[in-house]
Amino acid sequence: MRYTAIRPLLFRLDPETAHQLTLKLIRLGGYQPFRAILNGMYAAPEKPVQAFGLTFRNPVGLAAGYDKDAIAFRGLAALGFGHVEVGTVTPLPQSGNPRPRLFRLVEDRALINRLGFPGQGAEFVARQLTAARRPPSVVLGVNLGKNKDTPLEEAVEDYVVLLRRFLPLADYLVINVSSPNTVGLRRLQGREMLEGLLGQIARERAALAPDLSGRKPLLVKLAPDLSDEELDDALEVILRTGMDGVIATNTTLGRTGLRSARREEAGGLSGDPLRVRSEAVLRRVVKRLDGRLPAVSAGGIMSPEDAKTRLEAGAALVQVYTGLVYAGPGLVKDILQKV
């Protein structure tokens, strides 16, 4: 059955309920015979990419937020992704913000979420990653964030705990300092706080993996709402502290040009309205990094044409999320057939 036939039924459900149902179904795809069926349906051309010392079978990945607790990453791998990023993971379990907290803006092909990092916590996610046999061809990333109740001044302790737990389990890790849904988190993108955070994380990684060949890449995910000066400051710190890459961008607080009646809901906006801003930030990131680090592009990638534009603009990899909600799982294959 084509996704276009199923989507109206899913869209009758509350968005978070629909997402949880979809995730449970995709989880089944991690087991035979369902995995073989999905592999057959979504088989895509191999287009290997090298980035931050890793080999990806193709440049299309799943952005963090879709599989927060790593319950379905094996099934997601069967949809053709070159990498799957789970999380955002926090050290301790937390419920996130009150529901409703996820909204479809169908007229705008967008979502607004104010989830607030709900999840089962680091130990639960670690058990998922150790209990399940890893798909051999898919790179696995883990996106890390602080607990809501952790004071900003102590945030580095949360990230260090997570680094220690997931360094042996992931292919790469992402320092998420850009979600708009945890109060104060984006302040960590400021020069002084970011330098303290990333400096400590870099020292901890060096202590855990003194042999350079054994180190896992560390990426930093940035917001689309930074001014040019703020973005330049953040990139300077990322370079200076020895990080391995940048993900641009997270969701936006902007609401320009929206038509939906839901446009004033609080939270981060993703989907088509983010496309122009996220692409502009990517171009500045690529220019500023000047080949010293790879950039991963996320935000507003809704079609093969969007993905092609980002790759041509200098992104080493692209990530999708909201595009899956509107276009369906065939989006990955469609992108890889056209880029």
Image: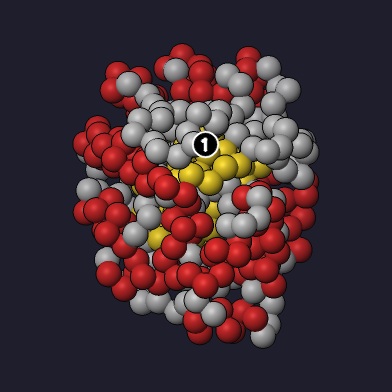
Residue 47, image x, y percentages = 33, 70
Q: Quadrant of the N terminus?
A: bottom right
Residue depicted at x 51% and y 57% = 325
- Crowding around mark 1 (Cα neighbors within 10 Å: few <14, some 14 to 19, many 20+) is some
Residue 160 in view of the camera: no
Quadrant housing residue 237:
top left
Q: Is residue 44 left or right of residue 34?
A: left
Residue depicted at x 71% and y 22% = 150
Q: Nearer the viewer, residue 218 or 30?
A: 30
Colour mode of the rendering:
secondary structure
Residue 315, image x, y percentages = 30, 49
Q: Is residue 72 left or right of residue 106?
A: right
Q: In the rendered image, which residue does mark 1 sit on? A: 262
Q: Nearer the viewer, residue 224 or 138?
A: 224
For label 1, the SS is loop
**Dot 1 amino acid type:** Arg
Q: Is residue 11 left or right of residue 237?
A: right
Quadrant housing residue 22:
bottom right
Q: Is residue 48 left or right of residue 31?
A: left
> Where 187 falls versus 92 (above or below)?
above
Residue depicted at x 35% and y 30% = 256
Residue 283, image x, y percentages = 24, 39
Quadrant housing residue 136:
bottom right
Residue 338 in view of the camera: yes
Residue 110, image x, y percentages = 45, 46
> Where 96 falls versus 308 (above or below)?
above
Q: Nearer the viewer, residue 287 or 250?
A: 250
Residue depicted at x 37% and y 61% = 59
Q: Residue furthest front?
A: 261
> Where 234 falls versus 143 (above or below)?
above
